[in-house]
């Protein structure tokens, strides 16, 4: 089995899309980013039954709300498509890739004030023991911020798998409340959540991603199911970002940036929002046309 068939492509695409969105700024690409303002996004895939429950089969709206805003995973796909640590600072695998030691951040707290520890990862992983982590044979807490994960079969792509949007980390002592209210370690604390309609998040002060992402003080996601309606919302400047299937829905595209190409894209942003130019430059986001097909499948 090749490297690419090991990994859920749709999950990687969603993770990378969220990273690109949160790395966006409200200033010119030639100016140093500054905190402030509000980013408004019109997204598809919302449902009135949506909850902050990673076991649900979420559309793009909740993928961004959860992974892009409220929650973190252990690793993440950066805007340029590379893998980097999020709640994990490092990982070491045995030569057969069957046992992995994960080092975790020590400077992280949940939005309810609880400190983030390895026990939270252990508890969050247990939610998926019968599904996407069914090859995990044991999770051992080695310390407050270190744990060992053993697999039934070696998997050199395991660090990539940890970026899966389903593998967000909840506070182990308040999982049910966290799923209901949206309590994570992400850049944005839940201010308002109307399932299938709207999410508003307020920027967390003193976050470990300061100076790297989360430049907007407020993030608003609006659920719009029709491509044409999302296109109109973007064209009329009701929103700054919209996920679309065809550029033709926009009509006049002056003042609009297409990502990554004009004829078949996943995102279009108003020129007032800057997105890193390297988006889509590396695998797995090097072919977002294909990624869109995987996502819509």
Image (spheres, rainbow, N blue to C red):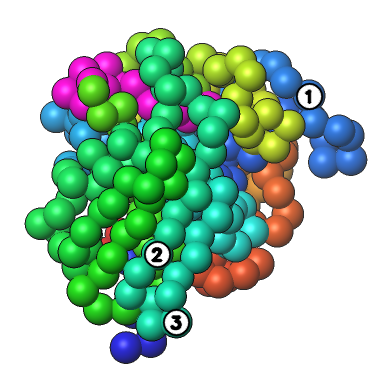
Q: Please indicate whether residue 28 sits to the left or right of residue 130 in the image.
A: right
Q: Earlier in the sequence, mark 3 or mark 2?
A: 3
Q: Secondary structure at mark 3?
A: loop
Front residue of 31/177: it is 177
Image vertical order of residue 8 relative to residue 46, above or below: below
Say which of marks 2 and 1 sits in front.
Answer: 2
Point out residue 185 in the picture as x, y percentages from the top left corner.
45, 28
Front residue of 133/54: it is 133
Mark 3, other Cα within 10 Å: few <14 / some 14–19 / many ≥20: few
Point out residue 162 in the picture as x, y percentages from the top left corner.
39, 56
Q: Does the magenta run of residues contain 184? A: yes
- Residue position for label 2: 100
Point out residue 183 in the picture as x, y percentages from the top left corner.
34, 21
Q: What span is in magenta? A: 174-187
- Residue position for label 3: 95
Q: Residue at x 73, y 54 (%)?
A: 277
- Residue that sits furthest to the bottom in the current view: 1
Q: Are marks 2 and 1 in contact (CB under 8 Å)?
A: no
Q: Earlier in the sequence, mark 3 or mark 1?
A: 1
Inspect this view and state whether residue 98 appears: yes
- Residue position for label 1: 34
Q: Are marks 3 and 1 in contact (CB under 8 Å)?
A: no
Image vertical order of residue 220 relative to residue 61, above or below: above
Point out residue 49 in the picture as x, y percentages from the top left corner.
14, 29
Q: Tell me which corner region of the image, top left, top right, bottom left or bottom right, holds residue 58.
A: top left
Q: Residue at x 15, y 54 (%)?
A: 129
Mark 2, other Cα within 10 Å: few <14 / some 14–19 / many ≥20: many
Q: Find residue 23 and name its label.
A: none
Q: Are marks 3 and 2 in contact (CB under 8 Å)?
A: no
For marks 3 and 2, give the CA distance: 10 Å
């Amino acid at each position: 089995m090749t490297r690419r068939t090991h990994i859920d492509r749709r999950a990687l695409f969603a993770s990378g899309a969220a990273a690109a969105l949160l790395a966006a700024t409200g200033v010119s690409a030639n100016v140093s980013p500054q905190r402030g303002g509000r980013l408004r996004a019109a997204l598809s895939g919302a449902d009135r039954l949506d909850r902050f429950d990673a076991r649900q089969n979420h559309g793009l709206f909740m993928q961004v709300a959860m992974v892009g805003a409220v929650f973190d995973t252990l690793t993440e796909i950066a805007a340029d498509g590379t893998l980097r640590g999020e709640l994990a600072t490092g990982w070491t695998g045995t030569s057969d890739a069957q046992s992995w030691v994960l080092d975790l951040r020590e400077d992280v707290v949940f939005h309810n004030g609880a400190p983030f520890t390895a026990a939270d990862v252990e508890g969050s992983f247990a939610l998926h023991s019968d599904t996407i982590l069914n090859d995990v044979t044991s999770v051992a807490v080695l310390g407050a911020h270190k744990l060992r994960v053993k697999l039934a079969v070696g998997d050199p792509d395991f660090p990539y798998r940890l970026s899966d949007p389903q593998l967000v980390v909840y506070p182990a002592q308040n999982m049910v409340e966290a799923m209901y209210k949206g309590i994570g370690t992400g850049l944005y604390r839940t201010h308002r959540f109307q399932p299938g309609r709207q999410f508003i998040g307020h920027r967390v002060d003193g976050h470990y991603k300061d100076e790297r992402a989360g430049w907007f003080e407020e993030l608003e996601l609006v659920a719009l199911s029709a491509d044409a309606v999302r296109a109109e919302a973007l064209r009329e400047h009701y929103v700054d970002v919209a996920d679309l299937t065809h550029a033709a829905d926009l009509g006049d595209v002056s003042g609009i940036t297409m990502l990554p190409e004009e004829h078949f894209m996943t995102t279009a942003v108003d020129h007032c929002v800057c997105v890193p130019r390297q988006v889509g430059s590396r695998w797995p986001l090097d072919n977002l046309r294909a990624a869109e097909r995987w996502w819509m499948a």
